Image: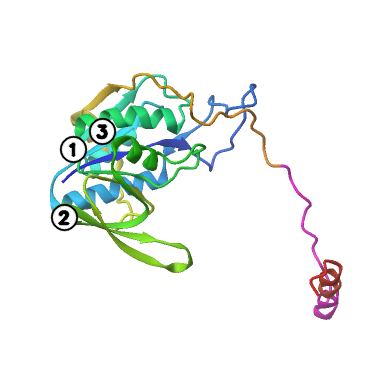
Amino acid sequence: MDIAVVVKLVPDLVEELAIDESGAALDTSYLRLIVNELDNHAVEQAILLKESAGGQVTVIAPDLEGVDDILFTAAAKGADRLIKLTGAMSGVNNYALSNSLAAIIREIKPHLVLTGVQANNDLDGSVGPRLAALLGMAYVGYVSGVTPANDSVKVRKEYSGGLVAQVAVRLPAVLGIQAAGKPPRYVPISKIRQMSKTARIKDQPAGDLDAGNGAAVKHMFKPEMGTHATMIEGEADEVADRLIAIFKEQDIL
């Protein structure tokens, strides 16, 4: 089974995010990018499928700072081909990214396309559904496990309320991964460095990154801070009486 995995780089939300002078984008001067967590699960799911059913795994990522390390890490896990989408990739939205990815995937002709079901910087929908529409493939999202079955795959799909369904999907198809069948494996830095000397990354021009029909950010701002919590002090009976008074003021009681 040949599998293509689409990987995005997203802002590290652990770091402090700053807005640039335009007021419509993040300041990239000190912005740290990391692999999207759910895309990392998509890579792991692809490797698990390769280990169980054979085949080849191709990982595709846009050319942004740190992408080489991410691709070499995928190779250290077991990916066979690494493709870097080159061009003016900074600030590219999912609409334009999907168009370029679809062109590459048509050349690769994989049986299965995996991507994280969403990313923390998605503004105009996730990449998976639009890729499926462009490629004319079926799409299933919020997948938490994939099992190969001849010319189809059985996917474990989660619904709200703790409901889980098993869905048979005929190949070729696109899946939005929420969680791999197993947690993403740890790769030692020494192995990643070794891969950086032996693995080859193919540069693939992104072509015309037309973002005209995607979402446009007009203004960004930090959420306004609301009122602080009121701490109620005193003995248990005093605190209980105060809580009852507050509930009555709010028409809860």
Residue 159 percent coordinates (x, y): 43, 62
Tell me the chief SS of the magenta region.
loop
Using a 10 Å C-alpha cutoff, classify the residue at mark 1 as few (fewer than 14 neighbours), some (14 to 19) or many (20 or more).
some
Q: Inspect the magenta stretch and tell me whether residue 237 lies in it.
A: yes
Q: Is residue 19 above or below residue 153?
A: above
Q: Amino acid at mark 1?
A: Asp
- Going from the N terminus, do you reach mark 2 or mark 1 first? 2
Residue 245 percent coordinates (x, y): 86, 72
Q: Which mark is residue 80?
A: 1
Q: Note whether residue 190 is visible.
A: no
Q: Quadrant of the C terminus?
A: bottom right
In three-dimensional space, the C-alpha distance between marks 1 and 3, rounded to whole angstroms, equals 15 Å
Label 3 belongs to which residue?
105
Q: Amino acid at mark 2?
A: Ser
In three-dimensional space, the C-alpha distance between marks 2 and 1, rounded to whole angstroms, equals 15 Å
Q: Amino acid at mark 3?
A: Ile
* Badge 1 element: loop
Q: Nearer the viewer, residue 199 or 62?
A: 62
Label 2 belongs to which residue?
52
Query: Residue sitting at 49 percent across and 30 percent down?
Result: 214
* Magenta span of residues: 224-241
Residue 39: which quarter of the image?
top left
Q: Is 151 displayed left or right of 189 in the figure?
A: left
